[in-house]
Image (spheres, rainbow, N blue to C red):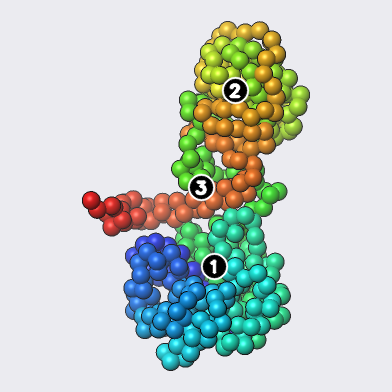
Amino acid sequence: MSVKLQVALDLMNLERALRIAKEAVEGGVDLLEAGTPLIKSEGIESVRRLKAEFPKKTIVADMKTMDVGSVEVEIAAKAGADVIAVLAAADDETIKEAVKSARNYDAEIMADMLGVSDPPERTREVCRLGVDYVGVHVGIDSQMRGEDPLDVLSEIVKNSTVPVAVAGGINSETAPSLVKKGAEIVIVGGAIIKASDVKEAARSVRRAIDQGVSISSEVSKKYGTQDIIKALDKVSTPNVSDAMHRAPCMKGIKQMTAGGKKIVGKAITVKTVDGDWAKPVEAIEEAEEGDVIVIDADGGETAVWGELASWSCKMKGVSGIVIDGAVRDVGDIDGIDFPIFAKHKASDAGEPKGYGGIGVDIKCGGVRVKSGDWIIGDSSGVMVIPKEEAVMIANRALDVMERENRVRQEIKEGRTLSVVMELQKWEKVD
C-alpha cells in the first residue's frame, strides 16, 4: 500500500478543527483524526461532524480506549468513525471486544502502543488479537522531553503483521526517515494544525513522504539536551511563562540597556549585599562562555555592577547580567552592546568587601535561582527555568509559540481573538 498521511486534530474547539481539516484535505491529507482532546472537549459530535463534512475521507477516532472496548467502539463507529484507536496497554479482553464490535460496524481497530513497556512483544500479541493497525506513538508530553518515535519504529515494524502507523512530533523534515523504517501511515499533528498555512504544510509533508526527501518545516521538531539554547532563542519570556503554567517572571527586574537585546544561558549565581561588588566581579572568573551571571544584592540601590565589569564579561563571552540590585554606567554599557537586567540604576557604587558567595542558591526578583538553571530575558522580563526541566520547558515554549502563530493567522483572516478561541462557549457560568 502507498504511504498515507493522517492529520491529528488535537484541538479543543470543533469549528476551528473543521476549518483546519478543510485546509489539510486540500493539502493532500488522506485520514482525518478526531484527536483525544477534541473528543473530550466536544464529544463524539466531533466525529459525526467530520464524517458529515468529509464523507469520502477516512475518519479516525482517537478514543484511547482502555476499558469497555465494545461500547466505546460502537459509539465511535455509529458516529461515523472508520478507524478507532484503543490502547494496546488495555486488557486482552478489552481489545478482543473492540475488534468484535468493529467488525459489526464495518470499522477497523488501531492498537496505540502508548505506554507499553515491551513494544515488540505487545505488537505480536495485539496482532494475534485481530487489530487492523499498530500505532507507534510518542505522546506529546514525552515529545517535550525529546523522545523520538524513530527509536522504536523498526522493532515494531519487524514484529507486526498489519500496517504500522507512526505519530510523535513528525514534520516534513522527519517524515521520510520514518517511511524508510517501514511506517505505512504517517500521523502529523502540530506541524500541520499549528502552521500559518495549513494547506501548504500538509503539501510539504505529502511531498516529503512521496519523494523521500526532507523538506524544511515551519513547525519545529522537538529539541534534545544539546539544543536548549537553539530552542529558547526562538521563543519569548511570555511563551516560557505559558509553558510553565503561567509562572511569574522576576518581579521588578527590568531591561536597563538599550537595544532590547535578549539573553539566554545557564545561570551562575552570586549572593552579595547592597553596594558590595566583590563577589559579582569575581564570578566573571568562574563564568563560562554563554553563561548569565545572576546577582542577589537584596534589591539594594547602590551599584554592584558597572561598565568595566561589563567589558570583562563581553570579552569572555558571558551572555548577560541579571541583578536584584543596582547597576551604574548604563550609558557606557549601551555602547558595548551588553545586556543588563536590574532593579535599579545608580551613579554610586559601594566597596568590594567580599560578603556572600558564588554558586549558592539565591532569590532574584522573588524567584529562586540555582546555578545551572536556565535564564531567558527579553523586553517583557526575565524567566528562570529549573535545569532539570529545561528540555521539556523549552519544547513546551516552542509549542506555545507555534500555536500562537496559527491563532495569529486566523485573526489576520478576519476573526477576532474571542471568536477564534470561542471564549463565550468556555466561560464559567455562575
User: In the image shown, does 54 or 301 lie closer to the viewer?
Assistant: 301
Numbered mark located on residue 243 in the image? 3
**Residue bearing the label numbered 2:** 296
Q: Is residue 318 above or below residue 168?
A: above
Q: Which residue is painted at 47% across and 46% down in the image? A: 245
Q: Quadrant of the N terminus?
A: bottom right
Q: Residues within 10 Å of mark 2 (few under 14, many from 20)?
A: many
1 or 2: tag closer to the N-terminus: 1
Q: Which residue is painted at 43% across and 64% down in the image? A: 37
Q: Which residue is painted at 64% across and 56% down in the image? A: 146
Q: Residues within 10 Å of mark 1 (few under 14, many from 20)?
A: many
Q: Is residue 287 above or below residue 81?
A: above
Viewed as shown, does residue 77 lie left or right of 179? left
Query: Mark 3 against mark 2, which lies toward the viewer?
Result: 2
How many numbered discs? 3
- Kindly identify the amino acid type of the residue bearing the numbered disc 2: Asp
**Residue bearing the label numbered 1:** 188
User: In the image shown, does 152 or 25 lie closer to the viewer?
Assistant: 152
- x%, y% of residue 55? 38, 82
Q: Secondary structure at mark 3?
A: helix
Q: Which residue is painted at 53% across and 13% down in the image? A: 301
Q: Residue lying furthest right in this view? A: 285
In whole angstroms, how far apart are the C-alphas of marks 3 and 2? Answer: 25 Å
Q: Are marks 3 and 2 in contact (CB under 8 Å)?
A: no
In whole angstroms, how far apart are the C-alphas of marks 1 and 2? Answer: 45 Å
- Kindly identify the amino acid type of the residue bearing the numbered disc 3: Ala
In whole angstroms, how far apart are the C-alphas of marks 3 and 1? Answer: 22 Å
Viewed as shown, does residue 2 lie left or right of 201? right
* Residue 75 visible in the shown view: yes
Query: Mark 1 against mark 2, which lies toward the viewer?
Result: 2
Q: Residues within 10 Å of mark 3 (few under 14, many from 20)?
A: many
